[in-house]
Each structure stands twice: as structure tokens, then as C-alpha cells.
Image (spheres, helix red, strand yellow):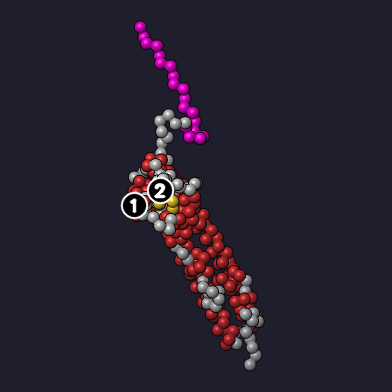
């Protein structure tokens, strides 16, 4: 019997392009849609906030504390996630990207099904070799296009996450500076940087409550203190009008 199967790479997973290998869920690795973009925005928010928390710890603790320093710890990631604004951001991200994820998953399954059909027809030897080859090349092109779409989708998610969460981070850091100024803390560490601390040193729940009540700015400067850098100087007082006779 004549072998009508199209000429195929001897090692299918190793010879396809990287994008095709990623999309070939039924033969190579786990579906790239699941790996690259399958994570829901609300869950994917966690790594971004963890990195922001470390940055916040560095900003709030520029020097080592002495034995007499007043120290506190805070879970910046949780403080961001569990504020009312943080919960709304997570819901917004989920709403924005869930429908896109369903679409990508559907395309991924369709490509996997098509690849199975090609394999079965090639093994049966009843379909002309050139026809199978053309269909296989079409499959490769569609897989590469899907991979490019998933990369764009992931970048868009990251950009939107950053856009919505950076303002929350800045407010949390300002709130912690307010607490440090008002209560004399010399050092506020992120919880992830503290291997051990007493439970009464943690400010996370308090920070969340203050955030939700609107106390999110830096503390006002003390009376008589010089204006903040970049602030406009106060206008000179106008002379009093002369009294009428």
C-alpha cells in the first residue's frame, strides 16, 4: 500500500517553531493558553503586588534601625488587595479579561482537535499526501497566530494591572509615611522581609481601615515647618483696608 501521509518532521515537538510547539497542546507541552494567559487577573494580581510590596519596603526603610528604634511591619500586598478599592480593581480586571480567556481557550481546543484529525488521517493513509501537507501548513500558521495573540493578551493584562494597582500602592505608601510621622516609627518593614516579629507590631489591618476611611495621604507638615519641595510659596498677606471715618 502506498504511504499517502505527508512528509512530517521526525521529531514533531522539536522541529516545529517555538510558537507552534507552545500551541500543540495534544503532543508537546501543556496548552500555552493555560500557561501564559490562563491565570485569572484577580489571581495574577498577587505576583505584581508582591513585587510592589518589596519596593515599598525599600522606600520606607532606607537605613538600618538601631536598638532604640521604633519598628513596625506591614503586609503591603494584603493591604492593597483587601482595601475596598483593591477589591474593586480585582473585580474590574476579572470582568475585562474573562471573556477574552474563554475565546482563547476555545481556539486552543479547536487547534488540538484539528491536529488529532490530521494525525489520524495520516495514519489511515487514505487522504492524498499533498492535501494533508497543505492542511498541516495551515494548522501551523493558525497555531503561530494564536501564540502571538496570547502574548499580546498577556502584555495587555500586565499593562492594565499596573495602571490600576500603581495608584493603590502609592496611597498605601503615603498612608504608612503618615503613620510613621504621627507615631514616631523609625522603620516600617514589609512583612515578607521580616523572618520574625511580634504580632502587636503589625500595622496591616490598621492600614486597611485607615485606607477605607480615606486617610491615604502623607501627614501634614508640622506648624512652622518649611514647605514641601516643589510646593508653591504662600501668597503674601494683603494689607488691611484703612478704617472709614
- Helix, strand or loop at label 1? It is helix
Q: Quadrant of the C terminus?
A: top left
Q: Closest to the observer: 97 or 169? A: 169
Marks 2 and 1 sit apart, C-alpha to C-alpha, by 11 Å
Where residue 16 sits: x, y (%)?
62, 74
Q: Is residue 45 visible?
A: no
- Whether residue 117 sits left or right of residue 186 in the image: it is right
Earlier-in-chain disc, 2 versus 1: 2
Count of numbered labels shown in the rendering: 2
Where residue 18 sits: x, y (%)?
61, 70
Q: Which mark is residue 63?
A: none
Please, which residue is most extreme toward the front here? Answer: 67
Magenta-highlighted residues: 227-245
Marks 2 and 1: CB-CB under 8 Å?
no
Q: Which residue is mark 2?
A: 71
Where residue 78 sits: x, y (%)?
40, 55
Q: Quadrant of residue 221?
A: top left
Please, which residue is most extreme toward the top here? Answer: 245
Tell me if residue 107 comes above or below residue 186 in the rendering: below
**Residue displayed at 57% across by 82% down:** 119
Q: Which residue is mark 1?
A: 200
**Residue displayed at 43% across by 56% down:** 194
Q: Quadrant of the N terminus?
A: bottom right
- Whether residue 157 sits left or right of residue 130 in the image: it is left
Tell me if residue 181 comes above or below residue 121 in the rendering: above
Mark 1: give few (<14), some (14-19) or many (20+) Cα within 10 Å: few
Q: Is residue 106 visible?
A: yes
- Whether residue 214 sits left or right of residue 227 in the image: it is left
**Residue displayed at 54% across by 74% down:** 29
Amino acid at each position: 500500500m502506498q504511504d499517502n501521509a505527508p512528509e512530517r518532521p521526525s521529531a514533531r515537538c522539536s522541529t516545529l517553531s517555538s510558537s507552534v510547539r507552545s500551541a500543540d497542546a495534544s503532543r508537546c507541552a501543556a496548552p500555552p493558553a493555560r500557561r501564559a494567559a490562563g491565570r485569572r487577573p484577580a489571581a495574577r494580581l498577587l505576583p505584581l503586588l508582591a513585587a510592589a510590596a518589596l519596593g515599598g519596603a525599600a522606600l520606607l526603610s532606607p537605613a538600618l534601625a538601631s536598638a532604640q528604634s521604633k519598628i513596625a511591619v506591614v503586609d503591603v500586598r494584603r493591604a492593597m488587595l483587601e482595601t475596598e478599592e483593591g477589591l474593586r480593581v480585582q473585580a474590574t480586571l476579572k470582568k475585562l479579561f474573562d471573556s477574552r480567556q474563554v475565546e482563547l481557550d476555545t481556539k486552543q481546543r479547536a487547534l488540538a482537535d484539528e491536529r488529532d484529525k490530521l494525525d489520524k488521517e495520516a495514519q489511515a493513509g487514505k487522504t492524498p499526501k499533498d492535501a494533508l501537507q497543505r492542511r498541516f501548513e495551515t494548522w501551523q500558521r493558525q497555531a503561530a497566530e494564536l501564540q502571538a495573540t496570547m502574548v499580546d493578551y498577556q502584555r495587555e493584562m500586565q499593562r492594565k494591572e499596573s495602571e490600576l494597582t500603581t495608584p493603590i500602592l502609592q496611597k498605601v505608601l503615603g498612608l504608612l509615611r503618615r503613620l510613621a510621622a504621627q507615631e514616631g516609627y523609625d522603620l516600617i518593614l514589609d512583612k515578607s522581609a521580616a523572618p520574625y516579629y511580634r504580632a502587636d507590631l503589625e500595622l496591616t489591618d490598621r492600614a486597611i481601615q485607615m485606607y477605607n476611611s480615606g486617610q491615604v495621604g502623607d501627614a501634614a507638615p508640622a506648624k512652622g515647618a518649611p514647605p514641601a519641595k516643589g510646593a508653591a510659596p504662600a501668597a503674601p498677606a494683603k494689607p488691611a483696608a484703612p478704617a472709614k471715618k
